[in-house]
Image (spheres, rainbow, N blue to C red):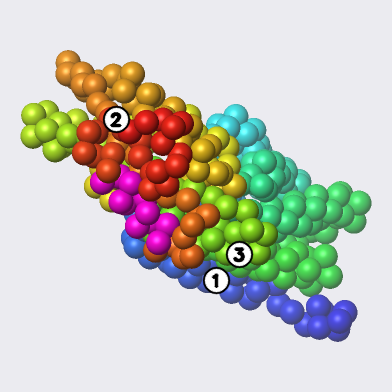
Amino acid sequence: MMELLNVINIQTAIFLIGVSVLIQSGLLWLQSMMIQEYRGIRTAALGNLLFGIGMLLTSFRGIASDFLTIILANYLVAIGTAALYVAVCRFVNERYRPSIIVVATLPVLVLLPYYTFVRVDFVARIVIMGLNGMILVGALAVHLFRLRHGTYRFSVLFLTYVSLVYFIFLMSRSVGMLIYPIADAFSPTPVLVFHAVALFASSFLWSMGFFLMVSQRLQMDLNELATVDSLTRIPNRRAMVALLEAEFARKSRVDIGFSVLLVDVDHFKIINDRYGHEMGDIVLRDMAQRMRDTLRGQDFISRWGGEEFLILLPATSLREAAEISERLRMLVEQSVFRFDRHQVSLTISIGIGNSGACPDLDKIYKCADLALYKAKLTRNAVAWNDMNIEQIYPLR
């Protein structure tokens, strides 16, 4: 292993790192073009671009001027690292701290020219750049660690570990330089060779982690589009069918019945015709939220279609379902829905279906649908098919 490290040309390795980071920047830029609604991707592409150009300029040391290969190169690396910190914070909707960026980059901007042209000190430059990276990468790891149980659990953990590993290496490199100083950035020492390898691995893994985070978010958004109603922000019909199937399977195993409520807004067409569809959308959205807040924690509400909602009541008898339905009916009857200077009062009709007398899901839904038809005869009513239960709440 040591023989392999000794034959690696650090200058060539840094050049290849720069090329690799520029390729990653291009891929991130293409991704930002395809997914323009996500914040932070373009900033990540810009950060990689600056970092990559900085690494390329560094690899020309001894060929181009010190201003280009030391001052400008390290400025771009420092600013690029700061941009990557900002990119991740923006993408995960975390507020980044400008003070952290200032503390990390100001010493680079001020002290780097001094230790290049006034007092030439390669070790000081390494330590300054190491502190810059440690502050920004450490702050990034802290932000990501806060999200370890959030939306992007796997990709966030991956990116957190990559950041922590690179933070530890930057710290060990800075301490190592102070203990065993060297005079040349391209000296083929094991420490510098290992740093070049670690830099290549961390930059590649960081970009892969960010790509993974974008992919995971995109997948979750697609799942949400497939299962959440865009207007009311409650499960849609497809999601409710899956819940009903799971509940029916559970009933088959443990023989615990459940009930469904089919809810229809009375005279909803009149609202759209009189006040416009915007008022109708507000009514549906507010009604969905009010009913959801009234239901028990284990209950599920979905938009079944148009002005219809379907509610799943797990482990609920017909009598309990009737009590819950009446509570919902009274809630809507006593509510006022407002839009601009308009306000309207509404009622709902509810049909109840119960799994006790139904051999399959279709029969349960048909039972609720027939009950809803019965309730719509008078409107503002709760109905069911089992006529023996009518003494609880007589049909209106």
- The disc, 3 or 1, on the residue closer to the chain's N-terminal end is 1
Dividing the picture into quadrants, the one containing residue 56 is: bottom right
**SS majority, magenta:** helix
Q: Which residue carries the number 3 mark?
A: 252
- Secondary structure, mark 1, is helix
**Which amino acid, mark 3?**
Ser
Give the label on residue 328, or none. none
In this view, 83 is above or below 381: below
Q: Compute the Cα span from label 2 to label 3.
A: 34 Å
Instruction: Residue at the far right: name it.
Output: 179
Residue 147 appears left or right of 122? left
Please give the range of residues in magenta.
Answer: 363-373
Q: Which residue carries the number 2 mark?
A: 396
- Name the residue located 69 percent from the left edge and 45 percent from the top edge: 145
Name the spot of residue 234 as percent of width and height, x first.
Answer: 41, 44
Dividing the picture into quadrants, the one containing residue 345 is: top left
- Name the residue located 15 percent from the left edge and 31 percent from the top edge: 271
- Secondary structure, mark 2, is loop
In this view, 369 is above or below 33: above
- The disc, 1 or 2, on the residue closer to the chain's N-terminal end is 1
Give the label on residue 20, or none. 1
- Secondary structure, mark 3, is helix
